[in-house]
Image: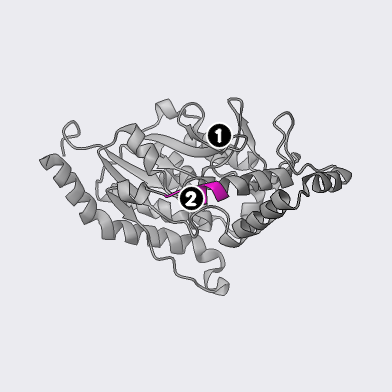
Amino acid sequence: MNQNLRPKIGLALSGSGNRTAFYIGFLERLAEAKIPIDYIAAMSGGSLVAAAYACGSLEEFKKWGLGINKLEVKKYVTKSNDRGGLYSLALLEEQMRVFTKGLTFEEAKPQMAFVAVDIENGEQVILCMGDIARAATISCTLPGAFEPVKWGGRTLVDGGLLSQIPIDVLKNAGVDITIGVNMRGTKHIFTPGQINAKKIINFFKKYLFIDKATSWIHGLFDEDIEFDFSKKPGIFSVLGKSLDIAIKASQQVDSNKAEADLIITPAIYTLKRSEFDDKENVYFYEMGKKIAGENISKIEDLIKSKNAV
C-alpha cells in the first residue's frame, strides 16, 4: 500500500476499566494484518496501551499487563497524601516511563492525543505534547479514587468524565477514516445510580436552601463541599464537582457514533468472578484479537472506498 496515497486512519479508544488488555490484542491483530494507524485518540486504560504501542514496546507491555494479577496491581496504586483522592498513580507513571522509553508525543509514531478533563471548569483537555507517560497516567485519574493532577496550570482528571469515545479528537486531527472502539460499560465513568443520587442532592440544595447548613456541617470535619480553585480541593468536592460535570454531559447528545466511519462495540459477557480469577487479562486480550480480526475486512473496505474518491 502506497503510504503517500492511502487515506490516513485514526483510531479512537474509549476507557476500558479492567478490560484494558482488550486493546493490546486489538492493536496487535491490526498490526499482523498490516492495517496502518496514523493517529490514536485515547483515554483511561486505552491511553496506556496506545502509549506503549506508539513507543514500540507493545510486546513488553503485553508481557507485563497479561502477567500482572490483582495483588500486584496494588504495587502501582499507593495511598495518596493529597486531600483530593484516596490513591496516587505516581508508581504507575514510573512503570509507564519504562514502556514509553522517556519519549515525548513529538517523537512517537503514530501520533497520539490523550483526553482529560479540567475539573475546575469542566472543559475537555487534549494532551498531545510533552511527556507521554505522564499524560497517559493523567487520563486514568478516576475522580475520587485518584488525586487530580496539575498540568500546565490546570487540574486534570479522567477524560471519560465527558466523552465516551474521542471521535471528535480524530476529526480535529484531520484523519480520513475514523474508527472508534467502545469498551465502556456505561456512557460516562459514573453509574446512572450515582448520577441520579447527585441530581437529588442538587435538587434539595437548590430548593430547600441547605447550602449554608451543609457547608457548616462539612466545615466541622475540615472538609469542603464546594470546589475551591484557590486551594487543593478535598475528595468530597472533587466527587461533587465531577458528578455535576457528568450530569451536564449526560444531558447532551453524543454525536460521535453518527460521525465515525466505524464504531466497534464488543459484546462484553458477564462472567462469574470465579471464572475470571487471574485469567481476566488473558480473556480480554484474546477478545481483542478476535474482534479486530472480525473487523479487518470492514476497515479494508473503508480504505478502498476512500481511495476511490
Of residues 183 and 27, which is closer to you in this image? 183
The quadrant in which residue 199 appears is bottom right
Assign a secondary structure to mark 1. helix
Residue 258: x, y in percent? 31, 50
Assign a secondary structure to mark 2. loop
Of residues 6 and 241, which is closer to you in this image? 241
Q: Residue at position x 36%, y 53% from top?
A: 26
Give, as a single range, the part of the protein colored magenta. 247-253
Of residues 97 and 195, which is closer to you in this image? 195
Q: Which mark is residue 134?
A: 1
Q: Residue at position x 34%, y 33% from top?
A: 173
Q: Is residue 250 part of the magenta span, yes or no? A: yes
Please state if 136 lies on the left or on the right of 149 as rendered. left
Q: Earlier in the sequence, mark 1 or mark 2?
A: 2
Q: Residue at position x 55%, y 34% from top?
A: 134
Residue 204: x, y in percent? 71, 54
> What's under tag 1, amino acid-wise?
Arg
Residue highlighted by disc 2? 15
Q: Which mark is residue 161?
A: none
- For the image shown, how many numbered marks are present on the structure? 2
Residue 187: x, y in percent? 48, 55
Is residue 110 at all visible to an observer of this figure? no
Q: Nearer the viewer, mark 1 or mark 2?
A: 2
Q: Is residue 121 part of the magenta span, yes or no? A: no
Of residues 197 and 262, which is closer to you in this image? 197
Q: Residue at position x 89%, y 45% from top?
A: 220
